[in-house]
Image: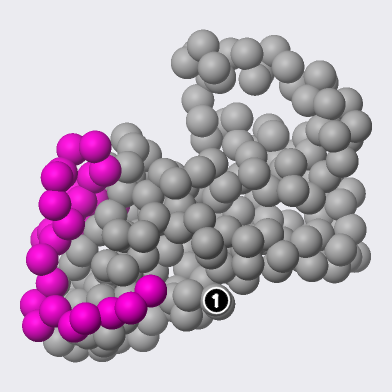
């Protein structure tokens, strides 16, 4: 799913939660895929960490892994993947219209487009198939058709975003790099770009060359 060496091309990197998608997609997936009883039962077990997270004394990357482990350990993989496909389809109507249009402009211009997210592969993979773009994200572990609750990669945020991009997309192969984000966890990714767009900081999207009219 990763790009090979392609000279004289441009690269566009999009964060997901809060950027391409306005909502917290991971929390949304929990409530979409799991019963309220299960969520409450497992949530009580990690309540001190949830409270610490909302008090800004427990980091987001640690909270995500703890929440994934609590909610999805021993989840049936085929069943969860079917729910993830349905969830991904429903999310398509909730994408940020201006950023979705920008993404499609990149595609129309022949740029390599990559979603780079700390959220998990379970539902991001079908989203990227629907959008026809590449994916770098937090990867989850399955054993015997069950999710173990563990990651097989580090949480894909901050420095990990930067490193994963560099590992899979040699920037010297690209003429121009664009990046779109919304939080401090995107800063390292944005620093790689020739044209960076941070929601809430930059007022206008990067102007793309030879702009093509795209309907969405």
Residue bearing mark 1: 130
Residue drawn at the location 72% of the way across and 65% of the way down: 86
In magenta segment, residue 3: no
Any magenta on residue 193?
Answer: yes
Q: Position of residue 137 (x, y in %)?
A: 51, 58
Q: Which residues are magenta?
A: 189-216
Is the C terminus in the top left, top right, bottom left or bottom right quadrant? Answer: bottom left
Magenta: main secondary structure equals loop
The answer to which of 5 and 34 lies nearer the viewer is 34
- Please, is residue 117 above or below residue 158 in the view? below
Task: Identify the secondary structure beneath mark 1.
Answer: helix
Q: Residue at x 57, y 59 (%)?
A: 91
Horizontally, is 130 left or right of 169 in the view? right
Note whether 138 is above or below 9 in the view shown: above
Relative height, residue 65 to residue 173 (above, below):
above
Please provide percent x and percent y for residue 149: 77, 46
Q: Is residue 176 visible?
A: yes
Left or right of 57, for residue 169: left
Q: Residue at x 27, y 67 (%)?
A: 102
Q: Is residue 68 left or right of residue 55?
A: right
Q: Tell me the residue at 45%/52% (across/down).
A: 21
Is residue 159 at least partly visible in the picture? no
């Amino acid at each position: 799913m990763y790009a090979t060496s392609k000279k004289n091309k441009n690269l566009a990197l999009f964060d997901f939660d809060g950027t391409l998608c306005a909502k917290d997609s991971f929390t949304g997936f929990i409530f979409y895929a799991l019963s309220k009883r299960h969520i409450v039962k497992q949530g009580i077990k990690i309540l001190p960490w949830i409270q610490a997270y909302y008090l800004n004394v427990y980091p987001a990357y640690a909270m995500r892994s703890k929440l994934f482990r609590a909610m999805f350990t021993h989840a049936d993989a085929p069943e969860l993947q079917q729910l993830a496909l349905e969830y991904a389809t429903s999310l398509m109507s909730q994408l940020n219209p201006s950023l979705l249009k920008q993404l499609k402009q990149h595609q129309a211009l022949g740029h390599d487009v990559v979603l780079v997210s700390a959220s998990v592969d379970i539902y991001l993979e079908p989203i990227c198939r629907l959008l026809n773009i590449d994916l770098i994200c937090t990867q989850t572990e399955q054993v015997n058709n069950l999710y173990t609750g563990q990651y097989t990669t580090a949480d894909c945020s901050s420095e990990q975003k930067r490193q994963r991009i560099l590992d899979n997309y040699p920037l010297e192969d690209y003429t121009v790099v664009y990046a779109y984000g919304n939080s401090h966890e995107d800063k390292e990714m944005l620093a790689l770009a020739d044209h960076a767009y941070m929601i809430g900081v930059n007022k206008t999207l990067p102007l793309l060359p030879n702009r093509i009219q795209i309907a969405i």
